Each structure stands twice: as C-alpha cells, then as structure tokens.
Amino acid sequence: MSCYEFVDEAESGRTAARPEFKRMIAMSKSSVPPFEAILVWKLNRFARNRADSITYKLLLQKNGIKVISINEPLDDSPTGKLMEGIIESLDEFYSANLGQDIKRGMKENALRGFYNGSQPPLGYELVKVKDGPKQRNKLAPEADSSPGVKTVKYIFALADRGKGCKEIANILNREEYITKAGKPWGRTTVHKILCNEAYTGTLIWGARPSQGLAKNEEAVRLENAWPSIIDKETFQRIQQSMVSRQPKNTHPRTVPSQYLLSGMAFCSCGAALTGHSAKSGQYAYYQCNRKFKQGNGVCNCQAIPKTKLESTVIKQIKSRVLIEENLEELVTQVNEALKSTSSRHKEKLAVLDAELDDTRQRLNRLYEAIESGKLNYDDLAPRIRELRERQTNLEKSRVLAEAEMVADSD
C-alpha cells in the first residue's frame, strides 16, 4: 500500500466541499482502494459536521477503510463508538458556536462603525483605530489627487451625465484607467462601484447571504461611518437613473433563448460568444462577450451574423456527428449512463440503510445504558431526541431516494 497526503489549507472542516477531501473520497471508491486507513490528527480534521462524518465514515467502512484519530485513540467496542459520537457532537457544537461568536463580533464591530473587510473599496484606505487594548479598522478616503479617488469621481461624473455602465467601462479603458486589481474595466465592475454606498460614507454589513445573518436579522446600516467621496444626493440621483434604464427583470427559465449556440460558442480569445440584436431586433449576431463589456481594445474579433454561424454549425453536425456509427455509439452511451444512474441510486440507498442501521444501534446502546443504570435518562434525553429526529429524516430520505430510482427507471 502507498502513502498519500491530503491537505486542505485554509478550508473549513464544517463542509465536505474541500478539494483534497473530495479527491481522497474519490480514490477510496475505486475498485481496489490504494489505502487501508486514513490518519487524522483529531476527528474534527476529518469533519465537523456530524451528518458528513457519519455518511463518509460509512462509505469508507464499506470499502474496508478505517478513520484513525492519532490524538483520540478509540476502539471498535460499543463504549468506543459512544465516545466517538460524543467527541464528534462536541466538535460540531464548538464549530457552530465559534461561527456564531465570530458573526456576533463582526456585527458589533459594524454597529460601532468599524470596517470588517480586509480590502477597502477603490479610493479608500484602511486606518487603524485604537479600541481599548485592540486596534480596529476604519475607512478613510485617499488623497484627492490619488488615482483611486480620481477614478471613482470620474465614474460617478460620467454616470451623472447619463452614461451607462458599458459606455463608462469603454471610456475608462480607452483612457487607460485600470481597476484596483490592475485589469481592464468591465460593465460589472463599474456597476458595483456605482451601487456601493460606502462612497457616501454609509456602512452596510450583513446584506449579503455569505455574511451569514439569520433570516429574521436585519443588516447593519450606519450613516456617516466615515468621510464620503460622493455626496448622497448625487448617489441617489444615479441610482434612480440606473433603475429607470433597467429592462424588466424576467427569470431566464421563462424566456427561451433565440440564439442556438448560447453558452456553447467561444471567441478565439477564450471569452464566450453571446447573442445580440440591433435595429429593434432586425439584425441578430454573435459577439465576443469580453469585447462587448470592455470595449474594442481587448479583442479584435468581428461580430458574426447569427444565421451564418448557426447554419454552418448545423451543417457540420449533420455531416460529421449525426451519422449512423455515431448514433449507435450514442445509444450505447445512453444505456451505460442509465445503468450508472441506477448504480448511484443503489449506492445512495445502501449508504442511507447503513446510516439508519448505525442510528438504531446508537439508540439501542443508549437504551441499554439507561436500563442497566449506568447512565441517567435525563442526561441522555437530548441525545436520544437528536438520534430519533435523525432516524426520522433518514427514513424520509430513503423514501425519496426510492421514488427517484423508480422515476429514473421509467
């Protein structure tokens, strides 16, 4: 057996969506796994989410692979498994509690006017402010003569004159302005600046889903948290102008695309070819999306008439792809895909069954501990409720998985 090392630096153990973790699990699922055991420093390095821990350990166990904690030696006895469950529950509680503490601290920071981000907006700089024994960040505008402040004021001035985001991006690129990251301007980057209330001195924290506020919690909004670069009247006037020019929003699923190659055609520079129309829909064509957003200087690709490009592609597909030999191969691949889908459903059911069996065993061990008088029911009641709830959820998931398997087989 070979020795492998899987390292996910700066990745939270609260999620299984870690590149090296996923690679490790994928390797363990091969017909002959290249390793027999996984060594971790502590169980919380494997997973801090109880459901993930149980699911992936059962999957590994099915392939004959053990998870061994170097710092928490546990055996396969009922007591060892009970201790493992307690350790994992404590790790999950610690991780969730720590996350709440961090969010609370960041919210308190924002309420007091301190800046939580690590990168200030263009035109601002971070300044350290003493807060008791600690130092915290606030925003302060750069000097009026700085490139950042000049760029921000120029963008808002152009928008105030009725220029759209794409046109502003083209002007900035033509006049050789660059973004904070040193890249050409695009309409999205311009739009983000024009919608950022930080430029009016307003602090907003918690409005983005990634900042993790609960649904019933309101985002922090603090006026005059730092000196402004743009006055509020100008900012509001530009917002109203942008809204008035905005087309009616319709979910993309309700609007079929008139461009056959949407999402499949690409420019020689690597950007997508996107569909556009002119003269009230009289002319339709594909154009390099990078050139469309950032202007002529970034790509020399010419617009291609929609009919010409689509008819050429269809002709090539008919002559090279839709031939008898390829169609037979396609049928074979579809049949294999159906078999693979069935196999995945069966594997999912096997994992759910294993989890259900594990949950029932854990409940039985707790009941036995209560009956023997080793442990008190009041102490174990919360854990028993948790396991019963998990058992109910697993049973529901199993019913849904069976329904999906039946639906896919029809």
Image (spheres, rainbow, N blue to C red):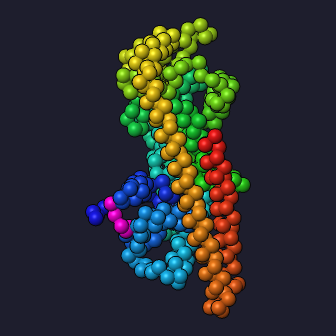
Coordinates of residue 226 in the picture (x, y in percent): 56, 48
Above or below, 32 relative to 391: above
Visible residue check, residue 171: no
In magenta, the rendered stretch is 34-38
Above or below, 23 relative to 91: above
Left/right placement of residue 76 relative to residue 219 reads: left
Q: Main secondary structure of the magenta part?
A: loop
Above or below, 52 relative to 379: above
Residue at image point 55% right, 29% down = 156
Coordinates of residue 211 in the picture (x, y in percent): 58, 52
Task: Pick the residue in front: 394 or 5.
Answer: 394
Visible residue check, residue 216: yes
Coordinates of residue 123 in the picture (x, y in percent): 47, 39
Coordinates of residue 25 in the picture (x, y in percent): 42, 57
Q: Quadrant of the C terminus?
A: top right
Above or below, 146 relative to 113: above
Residue at image point 40% right, 73% down = 68
Is 221 in the magenta?
no
Q: Quadrant of the N terminus?
A: bottom left
- Farthest residue in the left direction? 2
Residue at image point 50% right, 65% down = 58
